[in-house]
Image (cartoon, coloured by chain):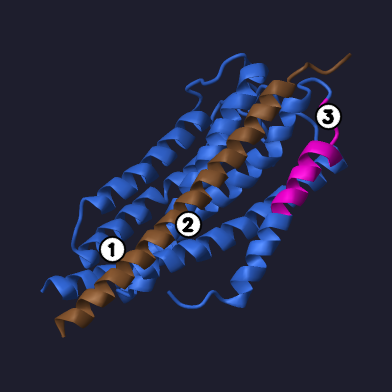
């Protein structure tokens, strides 16, 4: 007996996995970048205040 | 932010290699399942992500306890990292399960005990972030988060055990399946190898992402403290 043709489901599954992990990595990168910017701004403000 | 440790860079590289190797084992090395066909290949990522998802929720509960005892904010950062990374992985687990269920059970979703507990677990941890976002005081936020993570952590062993204790259509890989289980399959040695490769790869990726998230937590704390200092 031939196995059922379920290739599309498999492809969809792997696309979802990689896209989800990709979005998460992007969110981590963006958060790090924004926090570094904030840190620089507050450090400059602290310096100006002194 | 502190200089990136060399070990973390090594972990980054190992994670990429691990993901590639695991994908190869799942898509090429493992044989095609005789009845379900290629959709069965999502099983390897399904089990890999479920493993790190549930372990992460338990780790979050443990770090919640340690925080409540020590009041050291590093445990709060560890807890947040564990919950966040696990929630992301567990989301993949649920979606992959649903995609597999469509050809195997002829439905995308059914309120089976395993599917229900998995969905509840995911919602519990999404609510964790809503709870934290609503509290401004860092210590209060950490304390409430720790208690919540501790209670929420109970959902992980429940989700794991439910298919072994109740009548369910979800297949059981380790142990005896319920008589109502549908879509189970006999694992060949190559399938087992692919499964263990996925478990190993996702464990490395999980540790790597956790470490990155803990570093972001440290940066968040620094920014928060500086913001408070400047505004005073």
Crowding at mark 3 (Cα within 10 Å: few <14, some 14-19, many 20+): some
Residue B173 in sight: no
Q: CA distance from mark 3 to mark 1?
A: 47 Å
Q: Nearer the viewer, residue B37 or A29?
A: A29
**What colour is chain A?**
brown
Say few, some or many: other residues with alpha carbon within 10 Å of mark 2 (under 14 / 14 to 19 / 20 or more). Answer: few
Q: Is residue B177 visible?
A: yes
In this figure, which residue is indicated by the disc labeled 2?
A: A29
Q: Secondary structure under badge 3?
A: loop
Measured in 3D between alpha carbons, the distance from the residue under mark 3 to the one under mark 2, in whole angstroms, is 37 Å
Q: Residue at x 43, y 44 (%)?
A: B155
Residue where numbered disc 1 is placed: B142
Query: What kind of element bears circle 1?
Result: helix
Per the image, is B40 magenta?
A: no
The residue drawn where x is 46% and y is 77% is B2
* Chain letter behind tag 1: B
| Mark nearer the viewer, 3 or 2 | 2
């Amino acid at each position: 007996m031939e196995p059922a043709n379920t290739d599309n489901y498999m492809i969809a599954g792997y696309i979802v996995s990689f896209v989800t992990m990709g979005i998460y990595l992007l969110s981590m990168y963006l958060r790090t970048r924004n926090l570094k910017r904030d840190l620089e701004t507050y450090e400059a403000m602290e310096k100006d205040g002194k | 932010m502190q200089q990136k440790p060399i070990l973390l860079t090594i972990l980054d590289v190992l994670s990429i290699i691990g993901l590639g190797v695991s994908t190869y084992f799942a898509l090429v090395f493992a044989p095609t399942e005789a009845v379900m066909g290629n959709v069965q290949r999502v099983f390897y990522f399904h089990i890999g992500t479920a493993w790190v998802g549930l372990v992460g929720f338990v780790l979050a509960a443990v770090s919640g306890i340690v925080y409540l005892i020590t009041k050291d904010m590093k445990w709060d950062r560890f807890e947040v990292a564990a919950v966040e990374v696990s929630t992301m992985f567990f989301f993949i687990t649920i979606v992959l399960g649903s995609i597999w269920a469509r050809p195997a059970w002829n439905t995308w979703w059914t309120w089976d005990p395993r599917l229900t507990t998995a969905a509840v677990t995911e919602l519990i941890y999404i609510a964790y972030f809503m709870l934290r976002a609503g509290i401004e005081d860092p210590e209060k936020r950490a304390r409430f988060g720790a208690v919540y993570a501790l209670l929420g952590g109970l959902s992980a062993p429940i989700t794991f055990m439910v298919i072994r204790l109740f009548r369910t259509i979800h297949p059981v890989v380790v142990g005896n399946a319920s008589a109502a289980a549908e879509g189970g399959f006999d694992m060949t040695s190559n399938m087992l190898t692919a499964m263990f490769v996925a478990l190993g790869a996702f464990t490395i990726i999980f540790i790597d992402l956790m470490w990155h998230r803990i570093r972001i937590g440290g940066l968040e704390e620094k920014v928060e403290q500086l913001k408070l200092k400047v505004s005073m």
